[in-house]
Amino acid sequence: MIPASVGFQCPECVREGNASVRPVRGGGLRAATARWGTVTLSLIAINVAMFLVTAVSAAAGGASPLDNYVSPVFDALSQVPVLVAQGEWWRLFTAAFLHIGLLHLVFNMLALLVFGAQLEQVLGRGRFLTIYLMSALGGATAIQLFAAPFSPTAGASTGIYGLFGALGVVLIATKQDLRGLIGLLAINLVISFFPGISLIGHLGGLVTGTLTAGMFVLARRRPALQIVGVAVLAVVLLVLAVSGRTA
């Protein structure tokens, strides 16, 4: 007899059961996307690609590739509130895919891999991507309204903090323990007070991610209401971001 999770099974039964199970085929990219999520890995790939582009741009200008933040590409795509107010609205989105140095990129991508993969499995690709992009927009809007007007900002952490908020909503909805997430969030918020880190952007992403996930949970049986709610929130954030400051 063979020990099983409940009682025992005879060898013949185990062989017959295994014979009826289709073996797992393939590996590499297919296995990675199945484990970590297609959207999560795609977001990481975009962030890494943008870092390489800015690094090459910096090197072409005579700087070190690791000083990617001095490149013309970085200057053209990072969020500078006064420039957004003057019509360069794309910076609200492109800044979320830029990073200031290699360590900034690595830490954010590790966080995205861990929390993104978990939420993508629970919420599905579409809702997960929506929460991430909405959080990035919410963080950018907060920066636009409250940060120094001439200070450049970049990083995926606005979207990642939105994932923290979304995960909290999921844990509450499924009646799971929040203490681990609260502790992690508290540590990260303390780190956000360090010089060079945008506490304002982090809080904006956190609030927006929480609101967006809340709409998905509360209207989980009404997809049309989810779409309308997210669309209204997106319009409000965009209007605030592009018109909230002129100097």
Image: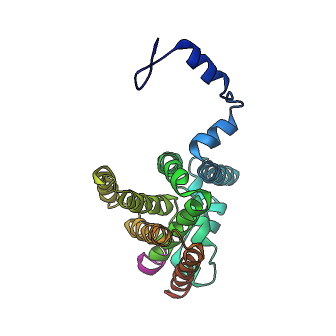
96 over 140 or under it: above or below: above
Closer to the camera in the image, 96 or 72: 96
**In the displayed structure, does residue 60 sit left or right of residue 186?**
right
Q: Is residue 197 visible?
A: no
Which residue is located at x 68 percent, y 50 percent? Answer: 56
Q: Nearer the viewer, residue 75 or 97?
A: 97
Specify whether residue 112 is painted magenta.
no
Q: Residue sitting at 43 percent across and 76 percent down?
A: 148
**Residue 167 appears left or right of 12:** left
Give residue 23's position: percent from left, percent from top: 68, 27
In which image quadrant can residue 17 be found?
top right
Say above or below: 50 vs 33. Answer: below
Please report the bounds of the magenta region as a residue range: 144-150
Residue 161: image location, x then y, percent: 43, 60
Question: Residue 240's spot in the image, x, y percent?
Answer: 51, 85
- Nearest the viewer among 136 and 123 is 123
Q: Is residue 230 visible?
A: yes
